[in-house]
Image (spheres, rainbow, N blue to C red):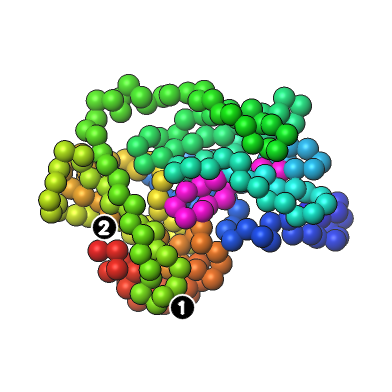
Amino acid sequence: VVDRDGAHPVCRTHDIAASIGSRVHHDMPTWRTAETSMFVVADESHAYVTLPRRGCTEIWRIALKGPVECTPVVTGERSCIVMDANARTRQLLYIASDLHKPWDLFLLDLDDNGRGREHAITRLNDEVLARWPKLEVRHLQLETPDGGLPLDAWFLARADRAGPLPTVMFIHGGPNLATGHAFRFDLQLLAANGYACVFGNFGGSAGYGEPYRRAIMGDWGARGFPDHMAIV
């Protein structure tokens, strides 16, 4: 927050180990939405921001004055992007996606603490998805080979398949993006046709703090390779 003349900047999010904005990799035609919908200012006291956390994208309430307060409002195993907030009606509008569903629109009725009860406004793909093969997801958590932060990864496959499967590893780009709880058509297509898909947040990924993002600076391929092998 800065004065109108640009003076007296005050950081209101220094307690958050993540950067503002949606960083979870997907293949839906909504990257522009993710790039432009980083935050909304509800009133002179609070803003709501989109930020990545360990393969998810959450919405947090940020105090704009007084003591620094950063409070998670919309969480869960999904990716959520804030669209608008109305202080008068005390409502928050956002879109959400997970590994099984593309974006839908949600409304959250806020209480005095900035939390509340959510309502799904759209269910655009339920009829189509009901005809697709059921997929299961396993969350894999392991330590990085260098003993750093826990490494998050996921294994996606048809629910009716067991035993060893031909497996495709998806490595997200960026490199300062992340993979996780967001819909991907390509992974759904592969898994529906009998392949397993494995993907994880190797060193350099977003959602784990700045030191983790900078872990592959100067040597993108070699420094990320041990993490990929640990996931396998």
Does residue 27 appear in this view? Answer: yes
Vertical side of 151 occupied by 52: above or below: above
Pick the residue in front: 186 or 157: 157
Does residue 36 appear in this view? Answer: no
The tag earlier along the polypeptide, 2 or 1, is 2
Pick the residue in front: 171 or 134: 134
In the image, residue 52 lies in the stretch drawn in magenta: yes
| Crowd around label 2: few <14 · some 14–19 · many ≥20 (10 Å) | some
Q: Tell me residue 31's x, y (percent).
A: 48, 44
Q: Taking 63 as reference, is 147 left or right? A: left
Residue 61 position by quadrant = top right
Q: Quadrant of the N terminus?
A: bottom right
Q: Taking 213 as reference, is 86 left or right? A: right
Residue 89 position by quadrant = top right
Mark-to-mark CA distance, 2 and 1: 23 Å
Q: Which residue is mark 2?
A: 169
Question: At label 1, which amino acid type do we have?
Answer: Gly
Vertical side of 209 occupied by 136: above or below: above
Q: Residue placed at 13% from the left, 54% from the top?
A: 164
Q: Residue placed at 35% from the left, 37% from the top?
A: 100
Q: Residue placed at 30% from the left, 45% from the top?
A: 137
Vertical side of 69 occupied by 45: above or below: above
What is the chief secondary structure element of the magenta stretch? strand
Q: Which residue is mark 1?
A: 218
Q: Tell me residue 107's x, y (percent).
A: 58, 28
Q: Tell me residue 106's x, y (percent).
A: 54, 29
Question: At label 2, which amino acid type do we have?
Answer: Met
Pick the residue in front: 42 or 110: 110
Q: Which residues are magenta?
A: 47-58
Quick one: SS at disc 1? loop
Vertical side of 170 occupied by 131: above or below: above
